[in-house]
Image (spheres, rainbow, N blue to C red):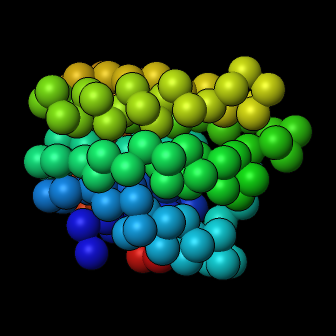
């Protein structure tokens, strides 16, 4: 699977990493598994790493259906959700902007796009110098 999801409870964080091509079907499957996980819930912060993304599924109708499902799963619970999209390539930035722009103000999701790892970690208030160090020093639960 080109998408991995890890919940890091001690940092109230979900780390999502895409590698290769982003497929709507794989993202939907990962979202379904995330929603079933006992540590999943409203208010978790999300770091979506798109730095290794090489292409995206161009089925925009299915992408919009998926975005609606994400709103039901992760938003509209009266608890704000903060999402940081990390992207540093044209395809990654395109995917990040699709994701960011899919959240309405009423959803309770605040989403930003950053282009480097340091900015992502600072925005999330994480005291690490890299994502690798974060994962090494955390108890991540794969979804």
Q: Which residue is drawn at 42% across and 76% down?
A: 142
Task: Quarter of the image for the N terminus: give it.
Answer: bottom left
Residue 60 image point, x, y percent: 43, 43
Residue 45 image point, x, y percent: 57, 43
Where 125 sits versus 29, above or below? Answer: above
Q: Residue at x 38, y 50 (%)?
A: 59
In screen coordinates, is 13 left or right of 105?
A: left
Q: Can residue 117 be seen in this view?
A: no
Residue 42 image point, x, y percent: 74, 52
Q: Which residue is drawn at 55% across and 77% down?
A: 33
Q: Quick one: 81 or 140, which is closer to the camera?
A: 81
Q: Which residue lies furthest to the right in this view?
A: 78
> Within the image, what quadrant is residue 82 found in?
top right
In screen coordinates, is 73 left or right of 78?
A: left
Where 114 sits versus 117, above or below? Answer: above
Q: Quick one: 79 or 28, which is closer to the camera?
A: 28
Q: Can residue 105 be seen in this view?
A: yes
Q: Residue at x 28, y 29 (%)?
A: 94
In screen coordinates, is 69 left or right of 24?
A: right
Residue 109 image point, x, y percent: 66, 32
Where 77 sits versus 122, above or below? Answer: below
| Count of numbered labels shown in the rendering | 0
């Amino acid at each position: 699977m080109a998408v991995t999801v890890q919940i890091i409870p001690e940092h109230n964080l979900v780390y999502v990493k895409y590698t290769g091509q982003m497929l709507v079907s794989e993202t939907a499957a990962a979202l379904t598994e995330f929603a079933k996980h006992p540590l999943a819930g409203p208010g978790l912060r999300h770091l979506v790493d798109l730095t290794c993304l090489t292409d995206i599924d161009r089925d925009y109708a299915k992408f919009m259906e998926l975005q609606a499902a994400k709103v039901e799963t992760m938003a509209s619970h009266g608890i704000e959700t903060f999402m940081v999209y990390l992207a540093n390539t044209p395809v990654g930035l395109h995917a990040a902007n699709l994701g960011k722009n899919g959240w309405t103000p009423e959803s309770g999701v605040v989403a930003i796009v950053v282009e480097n790892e340091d900015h992502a970690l600072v925005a999330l208030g994480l005291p690490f110098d890299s994502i690798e160090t974060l994962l090494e020093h955390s108890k991540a639960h794969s979804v």
